[in-house]
Image (cartoon, rainbow, N blue to C red):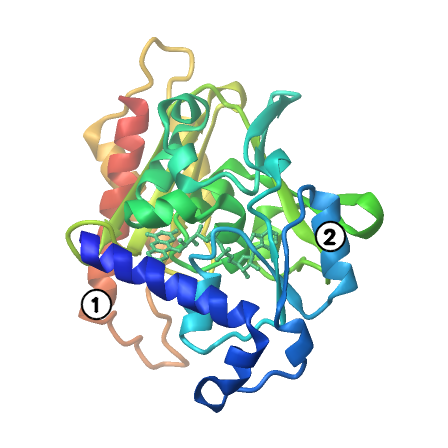
Amino acid sequence: MCQSCHVRAVSTYRTAVARLTAGTDLEGAAGLTTHAPQTAAAVTLPVSLDEAVAALTAMPAAVPVAGGTDLMAAVNAGLLRPAGLVGLGRISEIRGWHYQDGHALLGAGLTHARMGRPDFAALIPALAAASRAAGPPQIRNAGTLGGNIVTAAPTGDALPVLAALEAVLVIAGPGGARRETPVSHLLAGRDMLEPAELVGFVRVPLLHAPQVFLKATGRTGPGRATASVAVVLDPARRGVRCAVGAIAPMPLRPLEAEQWIASLIDWDGERAALAPEALHAFGEYVAAACIPDPVGEGDQTAPPLSPAVVHLRRTVAALARRALGRALA
Ligand SMILES: Cc1cc2nc3c(=O)[nH]c(=O)nc-3n(C[C@H](O)[C@H](O)[C@H](O)COP(=O)(O)OP(=O)(O)OC[C@H]3O[C@@H](n4cnc5c(N)ncnc54)[C@H](O)[C@@H]3O)c2cc1C
């Protein structure tokens, strides 16, 4: 993004926040209305997770906002009209991470920029790589892990990494309650956030082994993924875990391909490298599992895949092959 675009984006963002925080302006602007004009001015800036949950409990129509990169885009597009905002930016307990039983507890308020730094990359390399790929610098400075998860966009770069790591959310609820649910359950809609609940932390295993995240975009420079792949090695369990992002509403795990390739790796050898043919076959296996051939109905033969889908399949195969090759190199 050029400097003038950045300035424009920041000014648009500030204008939108100003509108949200000024009830009269909100009502006057373009004939827009709000059901609760008196609460349109409500912006709360709690300093702890429990305070934030209490603020949401007291004002159920308010929405939490972290970096605002997704939320304010929706406001600017006229898709969302929150009656109030609960800002999460001052909650220091969710802006870092700490260790617990071989896991890292990552605060939901960690920004992509922070996760892209070398000390974080030494802990969870694939998440650091995904964070470095998540949009232009202005977005990475503001956008957070929690926002990426809760927005749950197919193109969310952190999501395939969290799926491959089998990460778990620690959710804060009213009365100091804490509950846990796998990230994949939230992304699949099997376990949604209840009213006034917030994502507090993300529990990620520390595997101390190579991890790779690769992303394909439709343009040069920062852009949304057309396909992405995370590959994580888990030598202690002799496992390979892989997740494919952006090609479906939620990350896909090609479980059979994972098991097959893990069975070929010499986990006790000095180097776990595989022959190029095996890497190629893994890429094809992953791609075919995530983008299967169409099945014909009755005695009708199945229609062929469209050229765009064939191209996407090739992209996924190439990303998976390269990601595994780099992880094993
Ligand atoms: C120009 C542009 C480019 C982008 N490029 C990329 C990209 O390449 N890759 C990518 O992955 N993303 C990209 N994004 C999307 C966005 O930056 C990320 O999804 C970011 O991580 C969102 O975080 P946030 O803190 O800004 O979320 P917010 O906008 O503050 O919030 C998003 C949603 O999550 C909710 N929320 C936030 N935190 C919590 C919490 N702790 N508990 C419960 N709910 C919460 C909010 O209520 C809201 O519904 C891009 C966005 C823009 C505008």
Q: Amino acid at mark 2?
A: Val
> Which of these two is toward me, 27 or 268?
27
Asked whether the beta carbons under mark 1 and mark 2 sit within 8 Å of each other, the answer is no
Q: Which residue is mark 2?
A: 53
Spot occupied by residue 198 in the image (x, y as percentages of width and height)? 66, 51
Q: Quadrant of residue 268?
A: top left
- Quarter of the picture holding the C terminus: top left
Q: Is residue 188 above or below residue 214?
A: below
Q: Which residue is mark 1?
A: 308
| Residue at mark 1 to residue at mark 2: CA–CA distance | 45 Å
Whether residue 196 can be seen here: no
N-term-proximal mark, 1 vs 2: 2
Residue most extreme to the right: 175
Spot occupied by residue 306 in the image (x, y as percentages of width and height)? 22, 71
Q: Quadrant of residue 12?
A: bottom left
Query: Mark 2: few, some, or many residues within 10 Å (few <14, many ≥20)?
Result: many
Determine the residue positioned at 66% across, 21% down.
101
Q: Is residue 7 above or below residue 62?
A: above
Query: Mark 1: few, some, or many residues within 10 Å (few <14, many ≥20)?
Result: few
